Amino acid sequence: MATNDDRPIGRRQLLRGGLALGAGLAGLVLAGCGSTAAPASSATASAATSAKPAAAGSAATSAATSWDDMVAGAKKEGTVVLAGPPDADTRSKLPDIIKQKYGIDVQYLSQNSSQIAARMQAERAAGQYTVDLMLAGADSVYNTLAKENWLDPLKSALVMPGVADGSKWKAGGPWFRDAKGDTVLQLFNTVTTSVTVNSELVKDTITKSDDLLDPKWKGKIASFDPSVNGIGLQIGSSLYVSKGEDYLKKLYVGQNVALTADYRQIADYVAHGSYPIAIGVAPTYLDPYRKSGIQFGTPRFSDAPSPVSGGFGLVVLINRAPHPNAARVVANWLANTEGMTMYSQTQVQVPVRTDIDPTWIPKELIPQSGVQYFDGYDPQFLESKQAAIKQYFTKLLK
């Protein structure tokens, strides 16, 4: 299914309010652990709040508990409705592989996580339950799906042989980040590129975030909208913590930053030079332009830590799913070596299994030991702080 989010979004069409959050957010800056390791807190309960138990009276999901029975049940169901990232590579490859391996037809909902969450909200209000499984970003998972009690536990369903072998995971086991440690599985931990520049058009060296305030860049910077869930808010949150509100006002308002909530459009902006500097470009969307010969730079700020995140790498089971066995089969496959490898390649994200050598990942995206990062997928931050930052950007950019 093609995404409904392909239309261009004007410079300030979507933008809409400010809270000072204080210095307490500094604790969210984490050190990298090893060349591809998860944050230092990954092996412990780094989250504070989690998906709550299913609401009283909700229907229990019926799914097999052994792998062979699960696969048999999935084949009988014949279909899985999977909501995932809107990039063409994942959308084309993942359904074909699942069909070939397990005989399951994948109905792929190709939209941003927030759009899928809005769809589910409307459906559930009407008593409809159509989505089985979701590959999503953290904002929607923790602040919508979990809070609305729409999730089933996943840990006990990881029964595919070898999938839960602790020696194959950098966190010592499948990396569940919710407080109960059984519902929200994170597959990736990747350095988020804060800024991408068109190297043919930007010859100046950008080494710190303050460089973006140079008057010569006014009207030449685009950003993924930081007032909506997604990569723009992750980067905006990191800048909020490290640089403060005055800096953000000078940047986003003073530099007349163009805004979009379309992953393809922000990549197109910087590739074609409409805006030769872009904040919040997902690397997978730059691949077609790189193949055509366009060169990009990804400067790292010396005065603000880079975020690390999981991209669309949170796997969650939706409760009251119409195809529960098929959903669990797909979740197991994605959590195992083969599935995580394929998904890592299409998403250009660093896998958190130790038995995958991600040679396809640019070095600058791999967390390094001794480097401080801002953990944009930390559940404590997402559930207690990010809503206020989002509100700040909404007011600033209205």
Image (cartoon, rainbow, N blue to C red):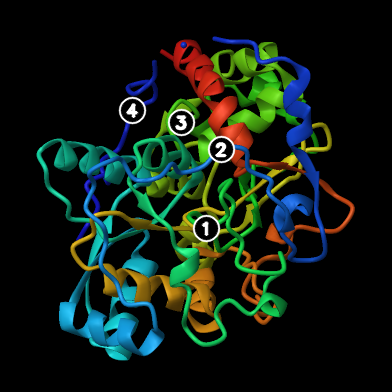
N-terminal-most mark, 1 or 3:
1
How far apart, in angstroms, are the residues tagged by discs 4 and 1? 40 Å
Q: Is residue 299 left or right of residue 81?
A: right
Q: Position of residue 202 (x, y in %)?
A: 66, 41
Which residue is identified by label 4? 10
Q: Is 351 placed above or below 320 here?
A: below
First in residue order: circle 1 vs circle 2:
2
Q: Are marks 1 and 3 in contact (CB under 8 Å)?
A: no
Residue 172 sits above or below residue 177 on the image: below
240 and 129: which is toward the camera: 129
Residue 235 visible, this orientation = no
Mark 4 secondary-structure assignment: loop
Q: Amino acid at mark 1?
A: Asp
In the picture, the disc for residue 182 is 1
Quadrant for the C terminus in the image? top left
Q: Is residue 31 left or right of residue 366?
A: right
**Left or right position of 29 against 56:** right
User: At 32% from the left edge and 22% from the top edge, which residue is drawn?
Assistant: 13
Taking the spot 51% from the left edge, 73% from the top edge, the residue there is 335
Q: CA distance from mark 1 to mark 3?
A: 32 Å
The span from disc 2 to disc 3 (Cα, nearest Å) is 26 Å
x and y percent of residue 9 in the render? 32, 32
Instruction: Tell me, yes or no, whether the two marked residues, 1 and 2, touch with CB atoms within 8 Å.
Output: no
Q: Residues within 10 Å of mark 4 (few under 14, many from 20)?
A: few
**Residue 288 in view (yes/no):** yes
Q: CA distance from mark 4 to mark 3?
A: 11 Å
Compared across the picture, whether 343 is left or right of 306 comes to left
Q: Amino acid at mark 4?
A: Gly
Name which of mark 4 and mark 3 comes first in the sequence. 4
C-alpha span from label 4 to label 2:
36 Å
